[in-house]
Amino acid sequence: MTQTDSGKTRQKLDRSDTRLRQDEGMSGALRGFIDRVRSGELGLLPVAIGLLVISTVFSILNPVFLAPNNLVNLLFDASAIGFIALGVVCVLLLGEIDLSVGSMSGLASAMIGVLWVRSGLPMPVAVGGALAAGVAMGLVYALLRNRFGMPSFVATLAGLLALLGAQLYILGPTGSINLPFSSSLVRFGQVMVMPAWLSHLLALLPGAFLLFNGLRKMALRSAANLSHEAASLLILRLFTFTVGLQFAVHYLNLGRGIPWMFALFVLFVMIMHYALTRTKWGRSVYAVGGNPEAARRAGIKVERIRMSAFVLCSMFATAGGIFGAARLASASQQAGTADVNLNAIAAAVIGGTSLFGGRGTAWAALFGILVIQAISNGLTLLNLSSSLRYMITGGVLAIAVIIDSMARQSRANHGRG
């Protein structure tokens, strides 16, 4: 072969590689998705399918389920426990557990009632005092785990009982304190919704951010001669996502609109997602959850990471208790009891957070609580007993854990292969 022919061959190969790097196409993207699913990287696929099935079944049984105002009420109800579930995600990522989040939220609501209504302190001071109690409780759990090696299951179970006792003690014999209906806190938890124009504007931001980030990633991979998603496919995917989001916002605005409390919850989910995926702290959380000893040998301060996770969990539980009190306009002995613990932990697991640590995202709290609240709302519309709700929620939780275990086995087999 002459030097000229060799040069032409190299040019053809370079052009072929360039086309491959620049445009994997729809078929390539589909193959990549199927490969990820086979290897156990399910992401939010199970919860998306679950939401679709739940919505279809309940809308057939009662068309009111998908009515705009009913969905708005669902978002109001989901927000308070969603905050608690977001904190649970933090400790589950470490392979730990906090069984006292319900009691912590109940104590927070009681502190709001006692400090704000009964003692007459300004509402921001009462909120600050409740959050301080949450931080203190998280530090106690971290101390018991790091210094004394007490399993988080035992430490938080003891905390559950202690916090429940404290809640009953500070509420006193009356057992209930009503919050002012005209207050900004109660209005925030019950009636305040976003203007339609603002909700549509904010619905454009996720697609714009993902487009910018995707194009930037494509440029970096192209510069490194690595394959990447086709620009046309990226734009089509994000256009479809944005249109769907705009339709959802439009549909909710046919009712009362999107609650500010739910918007605040989504904002904190986004903040935690950024912290977990784009910061050194977040990478350390996943490392400790995957293998604490390996993380320690890599120079990660395992005790500090545990402390931060427990503090965040208790703070989010406190926030959930405050917003729960605002939603009900009262602080009572029943706050934080019943199925609050179940729903918060189940939401995190159903959303895709592994009980074994090291896997999960902040979005698990959002999608998981939507599943939980959809089940509760649908059964309420059908006028069925709470016993069925407990059984169905327990069954969904069991399925989520089974899927997680099967995904772990699939990843292990794929890794050995």
Image (cartoon, rainbow, N blue to C red):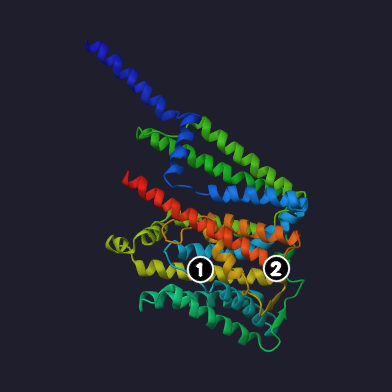
At 75% from the left and 56% from the top, the residue drawn is: 70
Label 2 environment density (alpha carbons within 10 Å; few <14, some 14–19, many ≥20): many
According to the picture, the residue beneath numbered tag 2 turns out to be 327
* Percent x, y of residue 256: 76, 55
Residue at x-position 46% and y-position 57%: 275
Image check: 322 left or right of 7? right
- Residue 215, percent across and down? 48, 37
Quarter of the image containing the C terminus? top left
- Amino acid carrying label 1: it is Cys
Is residue 34 visible in the rendered image? The answer is yes
List the single residue furthest toward the left.
Answer: 2
Query: Which one is nearer the viewer's eye here, 106 or 196?
Result: 106
Mark-to-mark CA distance, 2 and 1: 21 Å
Frontmost residue, 98 versus 253: 98
Decide: few, some or many residues near mark 1? Use Cα within 10 Å; few <14, some 14-19, many ≥20. many
The answer to whether the residue labelled 2 contacts the one labelled 1, judged by CB atoms less than 8 Å apart, is no
- Image height of 295 relative to 137, above or below: above
Label 1, on which residue? 313
Q: Residue at x 55, y 60 (%)?
A: 397
**Helix or strand or loop: what does disc 1 sit on?**
helix
Considering only vertical position in the picture, is 310 above or below 18?
A: below
Residue 90: horizontal and vertical position, in percent?
A: 47, 63
Name the quarter where the N terminus is drawn: top left
Q: Earlier in the sequence, mark 2 or mark 1?
A: 1
Nearest the eye: 307 or 126:
307
Q: Amino acid at mark 2?
A: Arg
- Which residue is drawn at the image coordinates 44% and 36% (left, top)? 218
The answer, for residue 125, to whether it is visible in the render is: no
